[in-house]
Image (cartoon, rainbow, N blue to C red):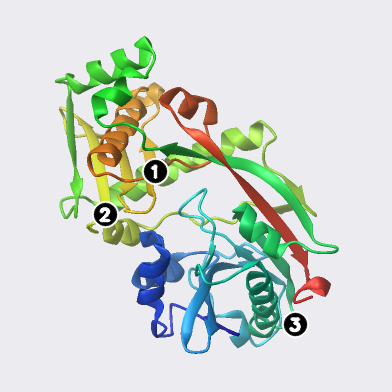
Amino acid sequence: MSVDIVDPRIEAEPVGWRDFCRRAGLPPVWDYQLMRTEAWLARNPPVLAIVHNGPQVVGALSVMVCRTFRDPAFAPRPPRRLRRPRPVWAEVYLPLLSGYPACVFDRSMDAAARRASLRHFERELVRFLGVGTLGVVYRAMTPEVGLAAVGRGRVAREIDPTSVMRNRWSSFADWLATLSPRLRAIVHRLAGDDTLHVTTGSERTDLDGRELATLLNAHRARQDARAWAEGQRSRVGGLHLDTRSPVAAAYLDAFVRRRDVVTTEYRDLNGRLLAFNTMIDHKVSSAVHHWAAVPGGEGGRKELYVDAYARCVRQMIEHGRPELTAGRTLLDVKGELGFETRPLTSVAVPRPLLGR
């Protein structure tokens, strides 16, 4: 077994990568060209670790390379090419798809093989990042991957679960009938609201990536500020642990053009963008993905998210997808819509324990 770490910005797509994505049923955020766009425009760029068993790809990790300083420049040089060592750490994490693990294995990999491959990955990571490596954090892992990452001296804890809706309905009307009268009334009212202009579909070429990114990043900034005020963010040694980068316009522009991405836009009659949603329409696990809206105090409509979720549920049911996921926030609201939860674990490994 071996592990290679590749930088999507400067290295070609690994041989066998597309076949592995197909076999593992990976969502589109693993597409190598999308990863390249993300990496060039991210403050903490992702690299891709490939696990090989002989010539075959049997596992992969999407790894953010994070730095302890604020640098406004995009696409910093890879750490192994820096002239002077600087402190860095790695996060095995999918910042653009909350609730999905950034570590995946082929079905042929048993528990012992998964554990061994992660130790191989950690040793290769130290060689890749250099002497400034502080450690690695496996974020939002499934229990199976979490068990492979844990060990003596490693810090593991269960985090907020992700929301999952199993497809158990034969029609959209059947799902609608399970909602409370209040939610059903909202769905029906918004469906007939002639003050809204709603467009939905896949392979969207009519959207402005810059407009979408502006709304999305403003929405995320408000969420982060609210979470910080409520004490839900943490600091270690004065370091802010939110390592996500703003979502780039170029990334969204490429993302919404995909066949497996359904995008819904909400505009008022003057053409102002009020909200948008992207859904990953995947045959293994569909996902309510990006959501952003103008705040109610700035002319937005507070209940549009209900319509967006209803459209995603309809897509899941009518296209026969086995499940729909919806991230790790607002679990009580999603529970009203019929979502359940799936446990997730995070594991932190300091430098002295890497590879052991």
Marks 2,3: beta carbons within 8 A = no
User: What residue is rendered at 28% in x and 24% in y?
Assistant: 174
User: What residue is rendered at 24% in x and 59% in y?
Assistant: 258
Q: CA distance from mark 3 to mark 1?
A: 43 Å
Residue 103 numbered mark, or none: none
Quarter containing the N terminus: bottom right
User: What residue is rendered at 20% in x and 22% in y?
Assistant: 191
Q: Is residue 324 above or below residue 336?
A: below
Of residue 153 and residue 144, the one placed in the foreground of this image is 144
- Report the amino acid beneath label 1: Glu
Residue 15 visible in the displayed image:
yes
Residue 300 visible in the displayed image:
no
Q: CA distance from mark 2 to mark 1?
A: 21 Å
Which of pointers 3 and 1 lies earlier in the amino acid sequence?
3
- Report the amino acid beneath label 3: Val
How far from the left and from the top, in percent, is residue 192? Answer: 17, 19
- Report the amino acid beneath label 2: Val
Residue topped by disc 1: 323
Location of residue 8 by image quarter: bottom left
Q: CA distance from mark 2 to mark 3?
A: 40 Å
Residue 131 numbered mark, or none: 3
Residue topped by disc 2: 256
How far from the left and from the top, in percent, is residue 89? Answer: 68, 68
Left/right of residue 268 with respect to residue 305 in the rendered view: left
Left/right of residue 177 with respect to residue 228 in the rendered view: left
For the residues carrying marks 3 and 1, which lies nearer the camera in this image? 1
Query: What kind of element bears circle 2?
Result: loop
